[in-house]
Amino acid sequence: MRFGCSLQGDPDRRVSRVGTLERADIDSVSFLANPRYKRFLATTEAGAVVLDPALAGDCPTAALLTKNPYATYARIATLLYPVPAQVPGIHASAVVDESAVIDPDAYVGPMAVIEAGVHIGPRVVVGPGCVVMRDCRIGADSRLVARVTLCADVKLGERVLLHPGVVIGADGFGLAPDKGHWVKVPQVGGVDIGSDVEVGANTTIDRGAIENTTIGDGVKLDNQIQIGHNVRIGAHTIVAGCTGISGSAVIGERCMIGGQVGIAGHLSICDDTVVIGQSLVASSILKRGTYSSAFTVDEATRFRKNAARFAQLDEFVREVRRARRDPGEPSAT
Amino acid sequence: MRFGCSLQGDPDRRVSRVGTLERADIDSVSFLANPRYKRFLATTEAGAVVLDPALAGDCPTAALLTKNPYATYARIATLLYPVPAQVPGIHASAVVDESAVIDPDAYVGPMAVIEAGVHIGPRVVVGPGCVVMRDCRIGADSRLVARVTLCADVKLGERVLLHPGVVIGADGFGLAPDKGHWVKVPQVGGVDIGSDVEVGANTTIDRGAIENTTIGDGVKLDNQIQIGHNVRIGAHTIVAGCTGISGSAVIGERCMIGGQVGIAGHLSICDDTVVIGQSLVASSILKRGTYSSAFTVDEATRFRKNAARFAQLDEFVREVRRARRDPGEPSAT
Amino acid sequence: MRFGCSLQGDPDRRVSRVGTLERADIDSVSFLANPRYKRFLATTEAGAVVLDPALAGDCPTAALLTKNPYATYARIATLLYPVPAQVPGIHASAVVDESAVIDPDAYVGPMAVIEAGVHIGPRVVVGPGCVVMRDCRIGADSRLVARVTLCADVKLGERVLLHPGVVIGADGFGLAPDKGHWVKVPQVGGVDIGSDVEVGANTTIDRGAIENTTIGDGVKLDNQIQIGHNVRIGAHTIVAGCTGISGSAVIGERCMIGGQVGIAGHLSICDDTVVIGQSLVASSILKRGTYSSAFTVDEATRFRKNAARFAQLDEFVREVRRARRDPGEPSAT
């Protein structure tokens, strides 16, 4: 079969759209990957379900069996919902510098601004309201959905997908203290984005201070992430929303960084590291594994009592150990 | 009286603007709602003060007495500062697809882009630089202040207010791991925003993966919030700035979620829940109440000593309990 | 010498660009400020290095000796990389209200929108896609890089630098609860930004509810920061990325606020305070110092064991103290 899965049930069943197990109809294909949705399998009315062979016996309809149902579903859905083709050309309202080189198969949308020295590759889509500043290069088949800003000297690989509000190449936060003031440090590096990178809405990636900020091939960044100057992120690493990565941090390949994580500057994180959402990485991680500093909510009154005890924890530990050495000492209250 | 409050003092007193208790003059109306500002009441020079009847005796000037002074002040200020009316029409610089249906009483500002199939209702204001992509629908009296992006298939109710930089309907963060790479999962759902919703500057709301992301009537979202795909937020819930809500989370009605809160995916939070700022909700909340996991600052040296003890807390508890069972065991240091 | 440093080595050495110690060549000037990069000094091929006189003996090439090498480097780099001059004028595609006053030496870029009553000072650059709403004032030599939004009544001092995606003057989050709904409180104050302020990409600064939000001279804000209504930030304070500052907080001068910090509303922080990244300030700080509530990651299994103990810490402390008063009591497990 085309997606490397085996079929159970009617081979002539046709589907034209996707649906959740709970609400799909006979014309829809669904999938089961997250076990918490298994409860909807028995009653699904989907035309077909992509799922693990181990669950084939529980599926009341046609089944597409594969060890990786989520990825298989993704590929089927990509066929069912192709990205609408864009007729090439430059919209009459766009402002394009005469020195920019734009592939004849590329599209530049309304209100876009393309500055001097820019190169735009084949089949690139620059959506409405984007600003591409001088000397940027955009590789083939990349798509700037809308209102994306590339500051000067940003390089994108191929098939890069940038969502609205993304800003790549703004100045890093480089400031030298001097007699109670801050002196701006020129940010003269660029940004190199690999191929097959996706960047979520309103995420920001700063240009390098001297050398380039670099994002590896296949990296996926969610919305509202902040990436400081000279950060390097290895290939196929994934970062969830609202995470902040400080300047000169080096993150390995295939890492999974949760949402709202803070990563301090000038440290390194090794390949295949997992960081739980809302954690803080303040020093290098040299050993692969799963790391956390994220407390989860408790009823607030109870949490505050425990937090008040935490605020005296060092004294308490000392008190307990003193008491064991000298059982006659009076206890605090 | 018009605002349902009773007047104490000169019935002919007129005010034309608002002011704080501390700095208002005789032409200004002020209010007292937060008790921490009560210290400015005795010396206020405001022409009138909106406040609770219990404080009427302390007010040195005309008083508007009401059990809800902040809401009453809000209504008075709305009358004193009406939103400037916008002459309907489409600015000459806007790019509007010929298939878009725009009410003759709506306004489309300079540099706006309106794509195919869009419906814009009466008295809607689409401010400068907004991008409204294909098949969006915007209900009556809604206002996109400036530089707002609506991706395809976003529906807004009536009286929706979207501040600059808002992005609604960008792709959710749907990625399936497959042999060390990430396969993009098409995000084919839309976004449904109810009526009377306000969304703060640079907040992002992702489109659904299959079904729609939905924001209920009267929901108020502050700035820089990230809302993942398929999140559902119940009516009249309020969320403070910088909070991140992961995919498929379901949040009840009338909740109050603080700033910088993290909410994990695929969980539910019941109606009327309060979450303190900077907390993490990692599993469902089934019982209404106030929840927290937010530690507040201490002097850093002291905090770090306590945090170092925390990092050995499990061992310490075990040690103490062992010692009580076997008092002869030597103590650690 | 021009930068107040003394030269060691060849006085005719010329440099034309900057480089890191590790990769600079003979035509580049480098610097050593962060001790963690000292290991690259012995083998650097830089044409000259800016560094502390104490390290002069370790420098294998020409040295520029100064007690503040980072600030001196910043000044040299500023000379080597001048901001490209902008030919004054108004781009043909910009939409400028006839009542706006624009200095003849200012520049307004493509797709910019300038509303009624705006004043723009000499040598100001309003980059592509910016929106400057009614009655804003922009002081001399300020630069809005691209896609910046200034809502009505925002005042900028001189030499202000605003990066792409910045939104200044959106409505604050003012809402009054009333019978299960939220009543919008009109936000009628403005925003005053001092001189020499820099604001990072996608940062938002809300307008005041009644009085103005104010940012002092020389304040430097990183990317993705949220600043609520009526916040006041004192001169020369610096704030790192993703930090959120709630309404009516008052922050002193020369403070250093880390990234992802949360600052609650209606409090004050004294001058010269340092707050470590990811901390929460929930009440006023009256004594200068360094403050933290930031836990750093541990191996996740170990962290969770400790967090589980934390969730019972109050009970544990009580248990231990009871046991000391009554040694016969049985221990929990």
Image: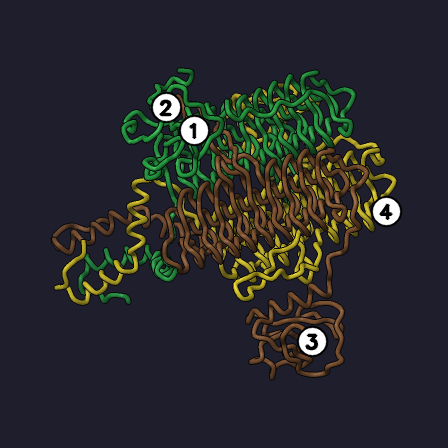
Chain colours: A green, B brown, C yellow
Q: Which residue is mark 2?
A: A64
- Judged by depth in the image, the label closer to the viewer, 4 or 1, is 1
**Residue A279 in view of the camera:** no
* Residue C279 in the image, given as x and y percentages of width and height: 47, 50
Label 4 – label 1 distance at C-alpha: 60 Å
Q: Which residue is mark 4?
A: C101
Q: Which amino acid type is marked by label 1? A: Val
* Chain containing the residue with disc 3: B
Have a look at marks 2 and 1 and say if they share a chain: yes
B296 lies left or right of B207 = left
Q: Which residue is mark 1?
A: A29
* Residue A37 in the image, given as x and y percentages of width and height: 36, 38
Q: Which amino acid type is marked by label 3? A: Ala
* Chain containing the residue with disc 2: A
* Chain containing the residue with disc 1: A
User: What residue lies at 32% left-to-right and 30% top-to-bottom?
Assistant: A59
Label 3 – label 2 distance at C-alpha: 72 Å
B280 lies left or right of B104 = left
Find residue A309 and report its image quarter: bottom left
Q: Which residue is mark 3?
A: B48
Q: Are marks 2 and 1 in contact (CB under 8 Å)?
A: yes
Q: Which amino acid type is marked by label 4? A: Val
Q: Earlier in the sequence, mark 2 or mark 1?
A: 1
- Judged by depth in the image, the label closer to the viewer, 4 or 3, is 3
Tag of residue A162: none
* Residue A178 in the image, given as x and y percentages of width and height: 63, 44
